[in-house]
Amino acid sequence: SKQIADEEKASARLYQNLTAPDTAIARAASAESPQIQPEIQELMAQNGDAVGLLHFEGDRTLYVCQTDDNFYYMSHRFDRSEDPAGMVYMDYRNSLLPRSDNLILYGHNMQDGSRFGTLKRFERKNYILKYPLFQLVDRYETVDYVPFTVFHTSILPDDPAYYAFDRTDFDDAADFDRYVREVKSRSVLEIPIDAAYGDRLLTLVTCHSDIDHGRLIIVLRELKDSDPIQR
C-alpha cells in the first residue's frame, strides 16, 4: 500500500508540473510531426510502456501503461515489480497515433481506494456532479472528458448481463450510434450528456462484485465548449 501511495504521489507531482497545451495545436502537431509531451517522455525514460497520466476527482493522478496484452499490468506496478494490485493500463489494441475512436483503460477495484477503487463512487449522481471531469494526458495530447453513462456488465458471454463494451473503433456513424444507444440504455444514472459520431471516447473499466465476473464501466466523451461544465 505504501509503495502504491508513493507512486500516486509521484504521478501527482508530475501532473502539477504540466503546462496546459493548446489542444488544436497539439492535434495539428500530432498529425504532421508528432511530438511526445515532455512529461510523458520523462515517464517513458523510466518505463517505455508509459502512455500517459489519468487525472480525476480533482486531485488524483495515475500512471497509465500499455503493452502487447491485457494481462501483464494486472499484476505489475509501474516499476515492473510484481503486485496483485497491478496498475492502470490501456487496452493493447488501442492506438494513440492514429488515435482509436475509444481508448479503454483498466484498473483493479482496490478496497483501499487505490487504482480504480474509487470509480464506484461515480454510481452516485451527486459524485459525478462534484467531479465531472477526467483528463487524460497521453503521449501527444491532453484531453478532457466527461461521463455520459455508468453501467454494469458481465464478461461471460453466456451471462444475461453480458455486453461487449470493449469497442476500440467503430465502422461508421450507424455503428457508433448503436453503441451509444446501448450503453446509455444500460446506465444506472440519467446523465444529460450525449455523444455524436466523431466524438472521441474514453472508457474506464474495473471489477463489480454484484455480477458474476462483473465489471463497472464508465464511458466518457471529449469535453465540448458547449458543455455546461467548467474546465
Image (cartoon, rainbow, N blue to C red):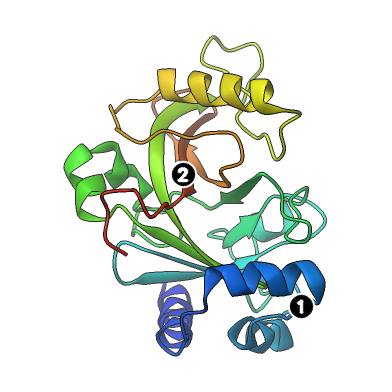
The label shown at residue 122 is none
Residue at 29% x, 67% y: name it: 58
Q: Is residue 205 above or below residue 28?
A: above
Determine if residue 14 is in view.
Answer: yes
36 to the left or right of 179: right
**In-front residue for pair 11/179:** 179
Residue at 61% x, 74% y: name it: 25
Which amino acid lies under the numbered mark 1 shown in the image of this protein? Gly
Residue 79 percent coordinates (x, y): 65, 79
Residue 50 percent coordinates (x, y): 68, 73
Alpha-carbon neighbours of circle 1 within 10 Å: few (<14), some, or many (≥20)? some
The residue where tag 1 is placed is 48
Residue 63 percent coordinates (x, y): 55, 71
**In-front residue for pair 224/38:** 224
The residue where tag 2 is placed is 220
**CA distance separating discs 2 and 1:** 27 Å
Q: Quadrant of residue 102?
A: top right
Which amino acid lies under the numbered mark 2 shown in the image of this protein? Leu
Residue 29 percent coordinates (x, y): 71, 75
Determine if residue 63 is in view.
Answer: no
